[in-house]
Image (spheres, coloured by chain):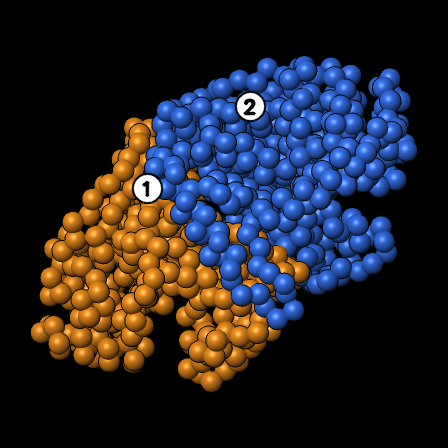
Chain colours: A orange, B blue
Amino acid sequence: MYNYKYLFDFTKNAFLRMGCREDHADTIADVFLAAELRGHASHGMLRLKDYYELWKAGRINVSPDIRVVHESPSTAVVDGDNAVGMVAARRSMELAIMKAEKAGTGWVATRNSNHFGIAGYYAMMALNHDMIGICLTNANPLVAPALSISRMMGTNPIAVAVPALHQPPFVADFATTPIARGKLAVAEKKGEKVAYGFVQDRTGKPSDDPAILKAGGSMVTLGGDRLHGSHKGYCLSAIVDIFSAVFSGANFGPFVPPSVAYLPVLDKKTGDGTGHFFGAMRLDSFQPAEEFKAKMDEWITTFRSSLPAEGEERVLIPGDPEREAEERIRREGIKLVPAVIDDLVKIADELGIEFSREGDPSFVIP
Amino acid sequence: MYNYKYLFDFTKNAFLRMGCREDHADTIADVFLAAELRGHASHGMLRLKDYYELWKAGRINVSPDIRVVHESPSTAVVDGDNAVGMVAARRSMELAIMKAEKAGTGWVATRNSNHFGIAGYYAMMALNHDMIGICLTNANPLVAPALSISRMMGTNPIAVAVPALHQPPFVADFATTPIARGKLAVAEKKGEKVAYGFVQDRTGKPSDDPAILKAGGSMVTLGGDRLHGSHKGYCLSAIVDIFSAVFSGANFGPFVPPSVAYLPVLDKKTGDGTGHFFGAMRLDSFQPAEEFKAKMDEWITTFRSSLPAEGEERVLIPGDPEREAEERIRREGIKLVPAVIDDLVKIADELGIEFSREGDPSFVIP
């Protein structure tokens, strides 16, 4: 079992050794650990290896010159200079918040970036400013449009964070597919089938094989099939792609570069790198902030009092599961699976730092 | 068979007789007919009766004083003064476009409005200004959050319109439920069952009964069940509700007032009327407009060239079905079902105008 500080310091040191500036390494470590704490281990320490391998392959820039290349009072376009995604993303969201301070709302499209971890992290940056935060990103193509078998889109997530007064904030952070890709990998490793409605084979027939992506299959969009609204999930994923890539000048759809080094660089480009989109909206550009937040409290308590379906204990507000995971994980510590520990020990060794295989020796239940 | 002009003039005259100003009656008729032309008859002439009955019951204001009650450089809140929804919505979207002219983007939240027809109409208003248009609205509560049986949300649609250069625009306009409510009504009238995955009974069990809403059932969110991502559809619908009602000061969730006169006014209010949210984003606040539109052409042709699944002919771009419907319906005329014709004849009679039961005598294939 590891505690927050041990993994934060390790991650920070790893990126410092790769050549990142200290404030950049801080940001990267903070986003990695936010994923672990919020219960999204699929975007946490497990992924450090992917960034490390991209760095070794010279495919990611640890000394980026992140620049604003276009702006209006409420908007900007940022060129991430092929930075580690977290660095370009945090800078972009800070800019959206600054724009919102003056214009009421701020909207930043970012190109030439890379995988940035969990979208919810950036949306939540707005909360302490009494703003709503929004974050979208495109991603490696694995998902077919409705009625198609071509992998044209990523799992393209949407994150929206809304502050409340006494209630915890509303934080939605979800892929525009029925499940995250990570769940397929887990089922495959366990030798299990998955439920129908997540993936299809190379002809477009529903499949329960979690390894079907390796056999020309694809993931389906939210909705699952045309009868149940997969065209709506396609619309959503397409909107995320357009906002992230066409506004910014990044690669769209099937041309988004791989976020892992074992996949080759694509031949065709339609822009620069991966694209993100960030929004910040001052509450008081619509309502006095205290009134808005009091109304959100009422919204949250109203929805929390919805009657559960038979067999269910309660109805959740978006953000509840992650907040409860964070409370638990801060208390109990962060558990890493053996394969991830192996990777981190190997990376530590190559970078000349240390990673304890036995867990954090200083870990005590606080 | 009716042609556009006949139904436009009839609708306009009906609202003039109810006391609307001419420009308001023009707007209302234009939105009704846009629904018919785009193949969404569920939001077209079929609904005229609902507005008429609300007017007869004194529950809708045909002489509204629509006011901007709060603003910042890129935002505004509009009080619709209980107007016919189309009138408040059009005015609000015009304001969003004006805000975007100066600030790069414009965002308007509208309260104290009513059912406004198809969301896509307002999003598409941005297209000729070289802007992306966005429109959201909350609606009568019929939909349960994931894991719940309480009707807390409407079918809360999302519309996003994006201009292209030589290609037709990208226009997504979709409810955040697997199907529209109208499809349940159609199946019920035909005495047919519906597929599983659209509705649930009063205990939360999946149902194939299209009349289940009358027996305490509810619609489910996009995703269908928890395994297939209904919590993501819940997030989406909740975001639409918060943007439409909490930003604007309208009623949220279960307190959205009925859009039909045969349902009583609700006892509890959490704001004023129904809420909408509108956005306009200048293309050139991110990229030179011509470059953006050329890139959208490339996006569209790329996605249109996706391989169809076995048994499918082609992959569509959002907006294709409605555009093709419009081409066909403009050519062939607008067909109304007998029950709608009966309603319109009765309304015409009561308002002292005429409606031809035989269809438009002047209709000729152009």
Q: Is residue B72 above or below residue A213?
A: above
The amino acid at mark 2 is: Arg
Which image quadrant: the N terminus of chain A?
A: bottom left
Q: Residue at position x 57%, y 18% from top? A: B66
Q: Residue at x 42, y 76 (%)?
A: A185
Pointer 1 residue: A108
Chain letter of the residue carrying label 2: B
Asked which secondary structure carries label 2, the reply is helix
Q: CA distance from mark 1 to mark 2?
A: 27 Å
Q: Tell me, yes or no, if residue A127 can be seen here.
A: no
Q: Secondary structure at mark 1?
A: strand
Give the x, y percent position of residue B314.
60, 61
Disc 1 residue type?
A: Val
Q: Give the quarter of the figure containing the C terminus of chain A.
A: bottom left
Query: Which residue carries the number 2 mark?
Result: B91
Q: Is residue A165 left or right of residue B275?
A: left
In the foreground, A135 or B331: B331
Q: Which residue is at 59% across, 38% downward?
A: B119
Marks 1/2 in contact by CB < 8 Å: the verdict is no
Q: Residue at x 70, y 33 (%)?
A: B33
